[in-house]
């Protein structure tokens, strides 16, 4: 089982993730239509790129936009969650060793205590996000099963990863569960709202072009996000 | 009864149809007929298939349901934080449902969607600035209005307005003759006070082609004279077109995209016929957006720009003050607390934030201009945008929606509110009437007339 999950299944997961996301990107870009979207993408490429870059960058910076500033609690929870969710899987020593072995490359490695703290932070943030969905009427009315599902899907590798970290009696079992949870996550990213790992950039770029080209970007100093 | 005599899926294309619709005061019969109007599911599906592409589809499906848009919406804030007023909810429960059900929706649903599209959103686009994913619910509500219009589920005044554009190429029954006659008559009225005042009609190759709002012709003709006076004082080489003078587009509020195209093409035709250096539009927000920002796309112009450079009246004023073509008498500057209401359609949708502040620096005594909070691109809708002001059916909701602006104005302590936008101007007038907070409101033109230095040759000889 271990050999299967770390062998063929690992490659399948990565392939599904990469191809699935690529298809998403291609379909999105090909579906853009200057007339329907009412944005002259081609005619004003430079203004478009500038608007897109600002639109993405400002939102990647904590408190970089007014929206982030007026909702500071959400912003902190949001960034802690996203930084952890990206940094731990990519920069954990054990993951890097695995990557080196399987794909022949590895990333920078996080110190073990940092990775551990971040993992707990991710779970704490996920919990806050769940509570937020339950507690706030304006979020509750929007929430669907899918929203809880993707949170659980994302949290599962962290829960199981932390269990492994504390070296339980049935370590081998939990490691298998951890790997399976991670691979399930990778496979499902392109097919769920988790596809926002790419669509966030596409959508932000698009609205950035809209404001950058049509809605004032070529007039003023650029949208005051 | 699937189709009513007045309420149906057919746009109003003739004067007779328009008169019949107008004769139904307030749309009583019209709304009665709407209760029995069928939904053409096949047509709805086809329209979705043709026009709901990447951007809108992705917006609908990627919404993280995080609720960060809630507080950005003034409807949500003034309606006791009703979760049903959260922008994401408003679009998911309408357009989202139509898509999920692949068009299989009924009459009751369409009534709910109509109220959501016209009484719970003014398409101010503010929420787009607060969504991490960059989802613009205002754009989607506007798209939804198009679907509803096509199915005949549109407020009576919107159907009338779109019909006006189709029949008269103006938002009201004002003909080219009415326009020219009124303009000339108003200029004559003021000629004694401003010798040499004139309005050049259909002059080729002028520096400025001036376009207006039909309301000015019909209800506020002094506005035309004021525009003429200011252009003359500034020494501009300007003209008005006898045809294609209407800047506005109620068709845009109605979601009648075909009428939008017809309307804006009439203005572009005037540009191409008279070949002015540029166009200046009157003090109207949505009109600027319709003709300058969105119009090029309706007319299929791939550069996204009108045939000639086109600017909003505030841009012309700022430029005239900057260059000294208009000089303000320092003694006559505004010496009372004053604030400015920027139209969503030019501030959030055309980046004119600094322009109006520059104007204020010239016309208000230092210390007297107080900006609202928040302001600039983050300013709130006046409460009556997107056609909301004009819809009788939703008047109670509109009056409530004015509370945001009322409180914002009161917070500044201003006694004078400048609104270079017809919609905002109306909303502020109505909020004063409704809530009596003791303010005056004005367009820029009459204020400028009172404080501008008139050159010798334009002064009446005693």
Image (spheres, coloured by chain):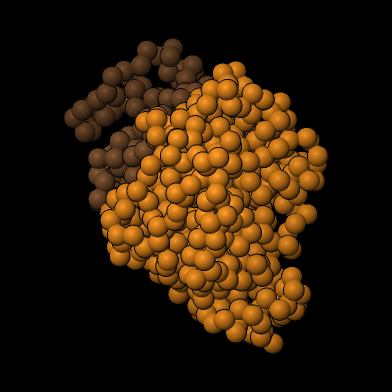
Chain colours: A brown, B orange
Which residue is the extreme one toward the front?
B462
Q: How many marks?
A: 0
Q: Nearer the viewer, residue B88 or A112?
A: B88
Residue B177 seen in this snapshot? yes
Residue at horizontal 33 percent and vertical 55 percent from the top: B306
Quadrant for residue B158, please give it: bottom right
Left/right of residue B41 with respect to residue B196 in the rendered view: right
Quadrant for residue B389, please give it: bottom right
Left/right of residue A169 with respect to residue A88 in the rendered view: right
Horizontal and vertical percent position of residue B406 = 72, 37
Residue at horizontal 53 percent and vertical 69 percent from the top: B178
Residue B356 seen in this snapshot? no
Residue at horizontal 34 percent and vertical 66 percent from the top: B269
Q: Nearer the viewer, residue B205 or A93?
A: B205
Residue at horizontal 41 percent and vertical 49 percent from the top: B280
- Quadrant location, the N terminus of chain A: top left
Horizontal and vertical percent position of residue B343 = 55, 43
């Amino acid at each position: 089982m271990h050999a299967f999950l770390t062998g063929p299944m690992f490659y399948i997961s990565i392939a599904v993730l990469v191809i699935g996301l690529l298809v998403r990107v291609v379909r999105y870009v090909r579906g853009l239509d200057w007339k329907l979207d009412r944005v002259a993408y081609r005619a004003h490429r430079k203004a478009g790129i500038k608007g897109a870059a600002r639109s993405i960058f400002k939102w990647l910076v904590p408190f970089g936009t007014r929206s982030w500033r007026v909702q500071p609690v959400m912003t902190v929870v949001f960034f802690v969650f996203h930084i952890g969710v990206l940094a731990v899987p990519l920069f954990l020593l054990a993951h890097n060793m695995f990557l080196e072995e399987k794909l022949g490359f590895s990333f920078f490695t996080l110190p073990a205590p940092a990775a551990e703290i971040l993992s707990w932070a991710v779970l704490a943030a996920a919990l806050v996000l769940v509570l937020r969905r339950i507690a706030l009427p304006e979020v509750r009315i929007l929430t669907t099963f899918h929203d809880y599902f993707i949170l659980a899907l994302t949290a599962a590798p962290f829960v199981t990863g932390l269990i492994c970290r504390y070296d339980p009696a049935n370590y081998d079992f939990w490691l298998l569960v951890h790997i399976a949870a991670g691979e399930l996550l990778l496979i499902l990213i392109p097919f769920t709202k988790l596809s926002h790992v790419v669509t966030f950039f596409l959508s932000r770029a698009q609205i950035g072009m809209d404001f950058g080209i049509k809605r004032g970007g070529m007039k003023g100093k650029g949208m005051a996000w | 009864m699937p189709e009513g005599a007045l309420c149906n899926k057919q746009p109003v294309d003739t004067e007779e149809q328009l008169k019949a619709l107008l004769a139904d005061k307030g749309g009583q019969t019209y709304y009665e007929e709407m209760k029995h109007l069928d939904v053409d599911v096949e047509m709805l599906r086809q329209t979705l298939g043709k026009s709901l592409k990447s951007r809108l589809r992705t917006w609908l499906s990627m919404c993280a349901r995080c609720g960060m848009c809630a507080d950005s919406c003034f409807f949500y804030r003034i309606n006791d934080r009703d979760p049903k007023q959260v922008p994401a909810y408003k679009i998911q429960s309408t357009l989202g449902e139509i898509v999920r059900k692949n068009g299989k929706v009924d009459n009751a649903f369409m009534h709910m969607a109509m109220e959501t599209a016209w009484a719970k959103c003014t398409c101010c686009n503010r929420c787009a600035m607060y969504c991490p994913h960059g989802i613009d619910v205002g754009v989607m509500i506007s798209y939804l209005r198009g679907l509803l219009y096509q199915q005949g589920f549109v407020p009576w005044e919107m159907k009338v307005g779109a019909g006006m554009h189709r029949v008269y190429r103006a938002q009201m029954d004002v003909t080219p003759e009415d326009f020219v006659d009124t303009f000339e008559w108003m200029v004559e009225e003021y000629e004694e006070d401003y010798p040499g005042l004139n309005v050049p009609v259909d002059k080729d190759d002028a520096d400025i082609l001036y376009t207006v709002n039909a309301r000015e012709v019909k209800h506020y003709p002094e506005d035309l004279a004021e525009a003429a006076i200011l252009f003359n004082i500034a020494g501009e080489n300007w003209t008005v077109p006898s045809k294609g003078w209407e800047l506005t587009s109620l068709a845009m509020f109605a979601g009648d995209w075909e009428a939008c195209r017809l309307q804006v093409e009439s203005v572009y035709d005037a540009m191409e016929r008279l070949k002015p250096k540029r166009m200046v539009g009157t003090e109207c927000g949505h009109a600027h957006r319709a003709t300058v920002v969105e119009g090029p796309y309706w007319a299929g112009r791939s550069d996204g720009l009108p045939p000639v450079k086109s600017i909003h009246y505030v841009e012309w004023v700022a430029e005239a003050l900057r260059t000294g073509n208009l000089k303000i008498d320092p003694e006559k500057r505004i010496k009372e607390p004053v604030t400015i209401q920027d139209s969503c359609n030019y501030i959030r949708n055309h980046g004119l934030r600094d322009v109006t502040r520059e104007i204020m620096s010239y016309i208000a005594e230092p210390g007297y201009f107080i900006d609202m909070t928040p302001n600039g691109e983050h300013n709130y809708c006046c409460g009556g945008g997107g056609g909301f002001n004009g819809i009788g059916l939703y008047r109670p909701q509109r009056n409530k929606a004015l509370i945001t602006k009322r409180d914002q104005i009161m917070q500044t302590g201003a006694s004078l509110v400048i609104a270079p936008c017809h919609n905002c101007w109306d909303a502020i007038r109505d909020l004063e009437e409704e809530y009596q907070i003791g303010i005056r409101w004005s367009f820029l033109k009459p204020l400028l007339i009172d404080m501008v230095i008139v050159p010798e040759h334009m002064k009446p000889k005693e």
